[in-house]
Amino acid sequence: MPAVPAVPAVPAAAANAPDIRALTEDDYPAWVRALGTGFLRSGEVGEEELAIRRGGIEPDRTLGAFDGDRCVATFRTFAQKLTVPGGAAVDSLAVTNVTVAATHRRRGLLTRMMTRELAAAKERGDVCSTLDAAEYPIYGRYGYGPAAWATEWEVDVHRTGLDRHRPVPPPPGARIDLAGAAEVCAEGAALHERVRVLPGRHGTVDRSGRWWRLATGELDWPGSGWTRPFHALYRDAAGRVRGLATYTVENRWEADLPQSVLTVRDLLADGPEAERALWHHLLSVDWVATVRTGRRAPDDLLPLLLPDVRAARTVHHADFLWLRPLDVPALLTSRTYPVEGALVLELRDPMGLAEGRFLLAAGTEGADCAPTGRAADLVLGVGELSALYLGDESASRLRALGRIDEERPGAVELADALLRTGRRPWCPDMF
């Protein structure tokens, strides 16, 4: 039987234990200072930063652990829409801003906050929970698993085989324009809403108006380290925005030769035509010798766009989006399936929130899922289901690792046929 990480017992609050509570207005400055300390950012927090950060925080979904007047741990959640295979979006509890002061580690503060918020999300009706994990070992004990990975490439522009003096032109009538922040806030937001529900975009999450204001610098504070980017919009022959690339450039010269580095912050497109055109644009910017792609899907089109694929060197590849089931029937019936089949999944949950035996009956026209008393076909932890759900991981590989038990011959092969997707999931946003 696959091992499920144990959740540390939630310690009984001693008389002198830190008090965990939702934020009040008086708590807010100490909470922001603790957040900065937790992420190893020193320096004073100014009034402008406090005011801007306050606009993105829901006090009743923001927890702090307070030892007297000092905040020693932070934890925040917000409502999020996660795109699943097929293009539907499910309600997720997004977890962010998790810190515990070095002076108060190993006292169960994270476990107390996580237990409280996951229980509230389950009662509220959230289908799952999502987060970006700063460190790999932390969240498996709470039922999360890595559901989407990300890869970053560094491209040696001079080795690509592309003629930067004759960049590949867009199709007739299409064009690429540089744009300002206000236009990007409007056009980019509309584009993203179209893109995130397209087939093959599973793993994408929604973006708020505030997200766009921060990304374009409309919201900024002294000392944030934000650098004004360039924005390139791809328009089709009808003038409709079909793609957006946001990037910064570090201007470098060596021996009177330009060696500038272009770093992509965001690139989204509603089809391969726009995506290819934007990459060709970025690879032909004058003075740029190196393009860093930022976090992209592991099966991004970019390397194969180049005549010399080896010009794109992988510099980073790691887990990124983590998922945790809360309502298993709702989660499994929200996505699509490429073939017909039925599986009984016995799930083990270290927190008991999604534990049980469930019958999934899936097909190309939809799926049903409900608790069942039938014998299990597969036995696995909720973290393993998380890794499988968006189509990235292989049940066969997890079985070889001893993390799935096959109780009925052929069940692992069927799970792979049902759950794997043609394109790998990808979440472009850190949250």
Image: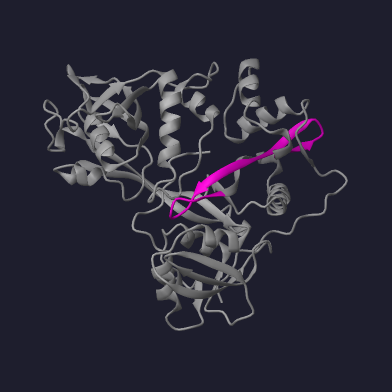
Q: At 51% across and 77% down in the image, what residue appears?
A: 405
Residue depicted at 53% across the width and 62% down the height: 332
Relative side of 417 to 58, left or right? left
Residue 364 horizontal side relative to residue 112, left or right: left
- Image coordinates of residue 250 in percent, x first then y, are 32, 22
User: With respect to residue 43, does 1 lie above or below?
Assistant: below
Q: Main secondary structure of the magenta part?
A: strand
Query: Considering depth in this image, is 208 or 32 the residue closer to the camera?
Result: 208
* Residue 75 or residue 55, whichever sits in front: 55
The single residue placed furthest to the right in the displayed view is 15
Where residue 49 appears, as percent x and y from the top left, is 61, 20
Q: Which color scheme does this rendered protein use?
A: one colour
* Quadrant in which the N terminus is drawn: bottom right
Q: Is residue 112 above or below residue 356?
A: above
| First to last magenta residue range | 62-90
Left or right position of 284 against 323: left
For residue 345, above or below residue 45 = below
Q: Identify which residue is drawn at 50% across, 72% down.
A: 404
Q: Which of these two is toward me, 347 or 87?
A: 87
Where is residue 328 drawn, in percent x and y? 59, 62
Q: Is 79 covered by the magenta stretch?
A: yes
Residue 270's place in the image compared with 402, above or below, is: above
User: Was residue 297 drawn as part of the magenta stretch in this picture?
Assistant: no
